[in-house]
Image (spheres, rainbow, N blue to C red):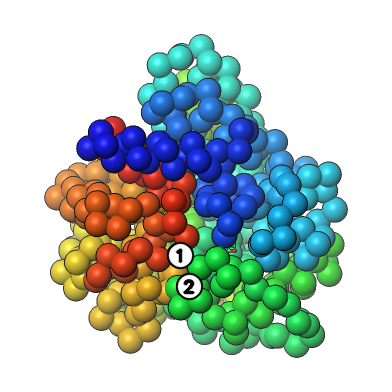
């Protein structure tokens, strides 16, 4: 155990660039939004100050409207595509123009609760609180213009689950005309069989070009996007962060932030009920452009358990995870191993990811589903013991996939074992 923790710490230290960490050398040479928030949890176990810095660096690049971008290009690196010239967001320190799962509120609350340096934690959490709250307000303003209680993502990269089966049908409606030639760089760092396809990349880039042509004006992007997806996992992370910010705001004496955050969370949880998919026995994505639930048995619908869903729903999710676990050697697969689209090594179409395991197991624990919680945690550590600190793993063979020496995988190991 201690040996694994030491190895995990060495991964974090290797990927540390001083005030931020890269997810892994080569494949991802900049700061990523939710990678940083989750990685800070790992740092907090051995260097609290460094954990706060990670999150402060991320939030320092928040846009004026409240959006927090998914990539911050702190320094030049030709090894990644699409780089700053493709995004064209016109910022002093270049960033991408889309966001990522808002797990920062959760991370800050957890680091705060466990902090041994209480004075530092109070000071640094207090400074971060209004920024995180502004990000949440941005979400409910610009990504839920009709006030449904649930926000939409406009690009698969926002969900983090880039090539999930969930987007396949909707992606048919995203054109590729005029995208032009480009050179992918990810496939020179990682096995192309583990990565999204070229067809998917053309559509990823078409969306980037489309949003850029609208000047990255967030007041316009939602309605102008052919891809508007309500992802239960993405919403659950945001809802959980709103609840955590509410508790933190109570503690720090910020009643207005507490009240509004609690209202966001309550409305969100009530609205999640619309994403319950009876035929799958789990939550699923809702395509806002077509007004239909998507029959895709992905992990997005299980990650919903990260927020305070009703206990009957949590129980059903626990049963569903047990079924999936019995169809693979390691849980939780990012797509149902019995579904025809399942692909055990291709990014989000089957592999296990430790960060999602961590969030689902946390939700299972909160819901009192202890045996499922423990099974997920045990499987996660078994994967590391067999295959090291990879980006993701084949749920049947434990084959390590994607990038190696991966920061957030290591951070989750420290979280689980400490
Ligand atoms: C990538 O480049 O694969 C990322 O997931 C996009 O953020």
Disc 2 element: loop
User: Quick one: 415 or 186, which is closer to the camera?
Assistant: 186
> Could you tell me if the residues under marks 1 and 2 are in contact, i.e. CB atoms within 8 Å?
yes
Which quarter is ligand 1 in? bottom right
Q: Position of residue 90 (x, y in %)?
A: 85, 53
Q: Residue at x 53, y 50 (%)?
A: 23
On screen, residue 11 above or below 207: above
Q: Is residue 392 left or right of residue 50?
A: left
- Residue at left 67%, top 61%? 79
Left/right placement of residue 90 relative to residue 379 reads right
For disc 2, the neighbor class at 10 Å (few under 14, some 14 to 19, many from 20) is some
Q: Nearer the viewer, residue 399 or 131?
A: 399
Judge by depth and name the residue closer to the eye, 384 or 276. 384
Name the quadrant containing residue 323: bottom left
Task: Tell me the crowding category of disc 1: few under 14, some 14 to 19, or many 20 or more residues within 10 angstroms, Cα based.
Answer: many
Q: Is residue 233 left or right of residue 127?
A: left
| Quarter that holds the C terminus | top left
- Could you tell me which secondary element the residue under label 1 belongs to? loop
Q: Which residue is mark 1?
A: 402
Read off the residue under disc 2.
191
Determine the residue positioned at 56% across, 72% down.
Answer: 187
User: In x, y percent, where is residue 162?
Assistant: 53, 68
The picture quadrant where one finds residue 126 is top right
Q: Is residue 132 visible?
A: no
Query: Which sits earlier in the primary sequence, circle 1 or circle 2?
Result: 2
- Is 45 placed above or below 390 here? above
Image quadrant in which the N terminus is located: top left
Above-or-below relation of 308 to 338:
above
Image spot of residue 262 (x, y percent) = 49, 38
Q: Quadrant of residue 82?
A: bottom right
């Amino acid at each position: 155990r201690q040996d694994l923790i030491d190895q995990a710490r060495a991964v974090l230290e290797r990927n540390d660039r001083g005030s931020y960490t890269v997810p892994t050398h080569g494949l991802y040479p900049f700061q990523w939004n939710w990678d940083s928030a989750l990685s800070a949890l790992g740092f907090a176990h051995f260097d609290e100050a460094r954990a706060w810095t990670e999150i402060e660096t991320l939030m320092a690049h928040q846009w004026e409207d409240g959006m927090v971008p998914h990539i911050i290009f702190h320094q030049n690196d030709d090894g990644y595509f699409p780089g700053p010239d493709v995004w064209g967001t016109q910022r002093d320190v270049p960033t991408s123009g889309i966001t990522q799962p808002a797990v920062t509120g959760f991370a800050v609350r957890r680091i705060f609760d466990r902090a041994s340096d209480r004075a530092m934690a109070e000071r640094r959490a207090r400074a971060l609180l209004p920024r995180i709250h502004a990000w949440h307000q941005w979400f409910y303003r610009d990504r839920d213009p009709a006030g449904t209680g649930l926000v939409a993502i406009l690009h698969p990269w926002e969900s983090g689950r880039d090539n999930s089966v969930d987007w396949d049908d909707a992606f048919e409606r995203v054109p590729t005309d005029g995208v032009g030639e480009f050179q992918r760089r990810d496939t020179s760092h990682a096995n192309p069989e583990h990565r999204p396809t070229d067809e998917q990349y053309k559509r990823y880039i078409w969306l980037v070009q489309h949003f850029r042509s609208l000047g990255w004006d967030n007041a316009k992007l939602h309605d102008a996007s052919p891809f508007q997806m309500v992802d239960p996992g993405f919403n659950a992370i945001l809802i959980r962060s709103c609840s955590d910010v509410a508790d933190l705001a109570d503690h720090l004496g910020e009643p207005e932030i507490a009240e509004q955050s609690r209202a966001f969370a309550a409305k969100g949880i009530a609205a999640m009920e619309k994403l319950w998919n009876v035929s799958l026995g789990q939550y699923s994505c809702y395509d806002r452009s077509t007004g239909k639930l998507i029959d895709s048995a992905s992990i997005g619908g299980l990650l919903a358990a990260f927020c305070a869903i009703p206990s009957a729903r949590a129980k059903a999710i626990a049963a569903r995870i047990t079924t999936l676990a019995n169809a693979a050697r390691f849980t939780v697969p990012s797509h149902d191993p019995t579904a025809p689209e399942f692909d055990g090594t291709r990014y989000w179409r089957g592999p296990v990811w430790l960060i999602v395991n961590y969030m689902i197991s946390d939700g299972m624990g909160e819901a009192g589903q202890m045996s499922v919680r423990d099974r997920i945690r045990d499987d996660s550590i078994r994967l590391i013991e067999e295959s090291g600190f990879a980006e993701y793993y084949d749920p049947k063979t434990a084959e390590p996939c994607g990038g190696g020496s991966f920061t957030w995988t290591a951070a989750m190991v420290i979280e689980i074992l400490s």
